[in-house]
Image (cartoon, grey):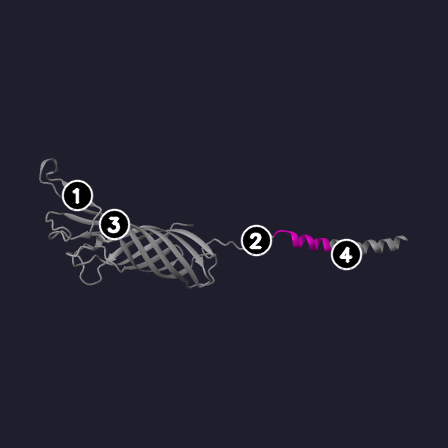
C-alpha cells in the first residue's frame, strides 16, 4: 500500500468516526439547566410574595351602629402563592392575618353595654384566614414583572381574639381626674366566622382593594344594627 492510498484511508476514517463521536456526546450530555427559563418569578409559573395592606371602612349601607368613621380601620399581612395558568389568567391563594378596629360615638350611652361614662370606646378583632382569587393580567408582554392586573375572589376569616376597650375619667382614689382604661376580652357577642368578596386592582407592587363582608361581627339579638361592611384600602408587596 503506497502513501497516497494510506492517506485516503486515513481521511475516510477521520470523516466517519469523529462526527459520529460528536453526535454521541451531544445526545448523551445533560442539558445545561442554567439556560432554561426559570419556573419561579413574578411572571413565571410560580411566585410567592408577602403583601402588607391597610383599609378604611366606609359608611355605606342601611341600619348601622353609630361609629366614628375615621377609627373604623383594618390592616394586616398576606402570604400569597401564585400559579400562572397562561399569559392572561393566574390562580392565587393567600394566607392572611387581619386586624379590625371600630370606634363608637360616646355622645350617648354605649350601644354595646349601655354605659354612660365613656370618653372613648373601641372594638378590636384579630383573625386569620384565606383569600382565593383569580388574577387577570392586562399587559401580556410585560417581561418578568407583575404588570397591571385585576383580581377577583372570596375571603374567609376566623376570629383569634376580640376586645372591647373603653376609656373614662376616674372618680376615686389615684384614678381621680386620670384616664382609666378597661379592656374586656373574649366577647361572646362577636361572630367568629367572617366571609365575603374581594376585588383588587394593581400595578406591580401597588394595589387598590375593595372588600365587602356578607356576615356581621355582632351576634347579640338586642343590637339590631350592624358594623360597617364595606372597605377600601391600599396594598404593597414587600417582596423584591
Q: CA distance from mark 1 to mark 3?
A: 16 Å
- Nearest to the observer: residue 172 or residue 204: 172
| In this view, the mark in front (4 or 2) | 4
Q: CA distance from mark 1 to mark 4?
A: 93 Å
- At mark 4, the secondary structure is helix
Task: Tell me if 178 is positioned left or right of 22 in this view.
Answer: left
196 is higher (above) or lower (below) than 164: below
Question: Upstream in the sequence, badge 1 or badge 2?
Answer: 2
Q: Residue furthest left?
A: 172
Task: Tell me if 28 is positioned left or right of 185 in this view.
Answer: right
Residue identified by numbered label 3: 125
Magenta stretch? Answer: 19-30
Question: Upstream in the sequence, badge 4 or badge 2?
Answer: 4
Residue identified by numbered label 4: 16
Question: Who's the residue at 15% across and 41% down the image?
Answer: 180
Question: Upstream in the sequence, badge 3 or badge 2?
Answer: 2
Residue identified by numbered label 1: 182
Question: Upstream in the sequence, badge 1 or badge 3?
Answer: 3
- At mark 2, the secondary structure is helix
- At mark 3, the secondary structure is strand
Crowding near the residue tagged with mark 4, few <14, some 14–19, many ≥20 C-alpha atoms within 10 Å: few
Residue identified by numbered label 2: 35
Numbered disc total: 4
Amino acid at each position: 500500500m503506497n502513501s497516497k492510498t494510506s492517506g485516503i484511508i486515513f481521511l475516510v476514517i477521520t470523516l466517519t468516526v469523529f462526527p459520529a463521536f460528536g453526535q454521541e456526546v451531544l445526545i448523551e450530555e445533560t442539558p445545561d439547566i442554567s439556560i432554561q427559563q426559570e419556573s419561579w418569578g413574578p411572571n413565571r409559573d410560580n411566585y410567592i410574595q408577602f403583601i402588607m395592606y391597610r383599609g378604611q371602612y366606609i359608611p355605606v349601607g342601611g341600619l348601622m351602629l353609630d361609629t366614628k368613621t375615621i377609627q373604623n380601620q383594618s390592616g394586616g399581612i398576606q402570604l400569597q402563592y401564585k400559579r400562572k395558568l397562561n399569559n392572561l389568567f393566574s390562580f392565587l391563594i393567600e394566607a392572611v392575618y387581619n386586624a379590625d378596629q371600630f370606634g363608637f360615638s360616646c355622645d350617648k350611652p354605649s350601644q354595646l353595654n349601655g354605659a354612660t361614662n365613656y370618653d372613648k370606646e373601641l372594638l378590636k378583632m384579630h383573625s386569620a384566614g384565606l383569600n382565593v382569587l383569580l388574577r387577570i393580567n392586562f399587559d401580556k408582554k410585560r417581561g418578568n414583572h407583575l404588570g397591571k392586573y385585576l383580581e377577583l375572589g372570596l375571603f374567609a376569616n376566623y376570629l383569634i381574639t376580640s376586645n372591647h376597650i373603653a376609656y373614662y375619667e376616674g372618680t376615686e382614689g389615684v384614678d381621680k381626674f386620670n384616664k382609666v382604661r378597661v379592656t374586656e376580652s373574649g366577647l361572646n357577642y362577636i361572630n367568629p366566622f367572617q366571609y365575603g368578596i374581594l376585588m383588587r386592582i394593581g400595578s406591580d407592587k401597588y394595589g387598590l382593594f375593595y372588600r365587602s363582608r356578607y356576615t356581621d361581627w355582632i351576634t347579640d339579638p338586642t343590637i339590631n344594627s350592624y358594623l360597617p361592611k364595606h372597605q377600601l384600602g391600599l396594598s404593597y408587596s414587600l417582596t423584591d
